[in-house]
Image: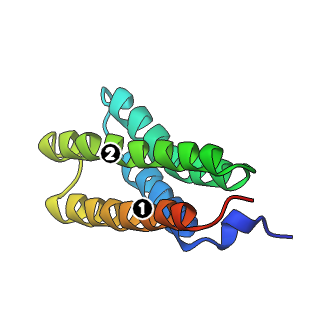
Amino acid sequence: MAFAFEKLLVYQRSIDFADQICTKTEVFPRGYGFLCDQLNRAALSIAANIAEGNGRFTKPDRKNFFGIARGSIQECVPLLELALRRKLLTPPDHDALKAQLEEIARMLSGLIAGLDRRESP
C-alpha cells in the first residue's frame, strides 16, 4: 500500500532531486564533507517535510511542514552556488539542479495555495 504523499508529483520530484544530489556529492573531494553533508540534508529535508506535512491532520500543521520544505529549497541554493564556485559541480549540472529546485518550489507553492483554497475539515 502506498502512502498518499507518494502519489504527489512534488514529492516524487523532490525525491528525484535528493537522489541526484546524493550521486553528485559522492565524488566531492576530501575536505568538502561539510558541504556534502549539508547539501544532502537540505535536499532530503524537502521530501521529508512534504511527507510529514501530508500526514498531518490540520491545515496549519500541513502548511508549517510545507513551509519548512520551502525553506530547505532555499537552503539548497547557496550550497549549490558554493559547489559551483569550488568547481565541484559543472555549470550545466548546477543549472539543471537549480532549475529542478525552481520547479519544486513552484509546485510546493501550488500545494500551499491549494490548502488555502480548501475548507478546513
The residue singled out by tag 2 in the image is 74
Residue at x 47% of width, y 46% of height: 67
Instruction: Assign the C terminus to one quadrant of the image.
Output: bottom right
For numbered disc 2, what is the local secondary structure? helix
* Mark 2: few/some/many CA within 10 Å (<14, 14-19, 20+): some
Q: Earlier in the sequence, mark 1 or mark 2?
A: 2
Q: Indicate the quadrant where residue 31 lies.
A: top left
For numbered disc 1, what is the local secondary structure? helix
**Which-is-in-front pick, marks 1 and 2?**
1
Q: Residue furthest front?
A: 119
* Mark 1: few/some/many CA within 10 Å (<14, 14-19, 20+): some
Q: Is 88 above or below relative to 11?
A: above
Colour mode of the rendering: rainbow
The residue singled out by tag 1 in the image is 109
Q: Is 12 above or below relative to 67?
A: below
The disc label shown at residue 16, or none:
none
Q: Indicate the quadrant where residue 17 lies.
A: bottom left
Instruction: Assign the N terminus to one quadrant of the image.
Output: bottom right
Residue at x 19% of width, y 39% of height: 82
Three-letter amino acid code of the residue under disc 2: Gln
